[in-house]
Amino acid sequence: MGRPQEFDEGKALTAASHIFRRYGYGGVSVKTLEAETGLSSGSLYNSFGNKDAVFARVLDHYNETVVKSRIRTHLANPNSLAGLISLFQSLLEEPNDGAFGCLLTNSAIEFAGQDTAARTAIDDGFAAFLTAFKATILAIQDVSEAQADGMSLRLLTYYQGLLVLIRHGHDKASLRATIKDEITAIIGVIDA
């Protein structure tokens, strides 16, 4: 019988997500993970597995604690165009005026074309946004499922584009000025 886990798994995964978000999978060593999480390499491997497994768990944790939380916070009322706009505007409010971007976005770029556990978790995160966007669109607009799917993909494309520009250091005020107009144009709402 193994020793019981003596650390807060959620805190360790959150700490690891911050470092992966900042430096990417390739830029993070096991020593960096040890320093950021406060865990030894033995504890990391015994609890999560190798670096690939740690990263996949981090992405799953990020989807549960960040992606789904953002969706709940901003799109709790699926009939709210204001919630959709606030979700996009919140991208510009990273703590300490940071610009490290989204772990999903950064990882999608880093793992483009690779079939890994990370890819599955990235796809799951994007699917959560698509589902939430579609529910909001269907509540706001009288459109077909196919139209809502197309609009949802356009929203996700715009969302991800904003995140890339933010990470690149684009002026946040100019990006903020585009949000309401772009969202209303994508979903075809005139009076927002």
Image (cartoon, rainbow, N blue to C red):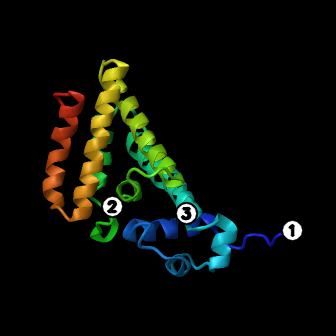
In the picture of the structure, the residue carrying the numbered disc 3 is 52
In the picture of the structure, the residue carrying the numbered disc 2 is 101
Determine whether, in the image, residue 16 is placed left or right of residue 40: left
Q: Which mark is residue 149?
A: none
Q: Residue 164, percent across and down?
A: 26, 56
Secondary structure at numbered mark 2: loop
Give the residue drawn at x 67%, y 77%. Answer: 42
- What amino acid type should be assigned to the residue bearing mark 1? Met
Give the residue drawn at x 28%, y 55%. Answer: 163
Q: Residue 2, percent across and down?
A: 82, 70
86 vs 43, nearest the viewer: 43
Q: Residue 34, percent across and down?
A: 56, 79
Tell me the quarter of the image containing the N terminus: bottom right
Point out the frontmost of discs 2 and 3: 3
81 vs 3, nearest the viewer: 3
Which is more N-terminal, label 3 or label 1? 1
Secondary structure at numbered mark 1: loop
19 vs 80, nearest the viewer: 19
Q: Are marks 2 and 1 in contact (CB under 8 Å)?
A: no
Give the residue drawn at x 15%, y 61%. Answer: 171
Dot 1, crowdedness within 10 Å: few (<14), some or many (≥20)? few
Determine whether, in the image, residue 53 is placed left or right of residue 159: right
Marks 2 and 3 sit apart, C-alpha to C-alpha, by 21 Å
Q: Is residue 176 above or below residue 127?
A: below
- What amino acid type should be assigned to the residue bearing mark 2? Gly
- What amino acid type should be assigned to the residue bearing mark 3? Asp
In the picture of the structure, the residue carrying the numbered disc 1 is 1
39 vs 92, nearest the viewer: 39
Dot 2, crowdedness within 10 Å: few (<14), some or many (≥20)? many
Which is more N-terminal, label 1 or label 2? 1
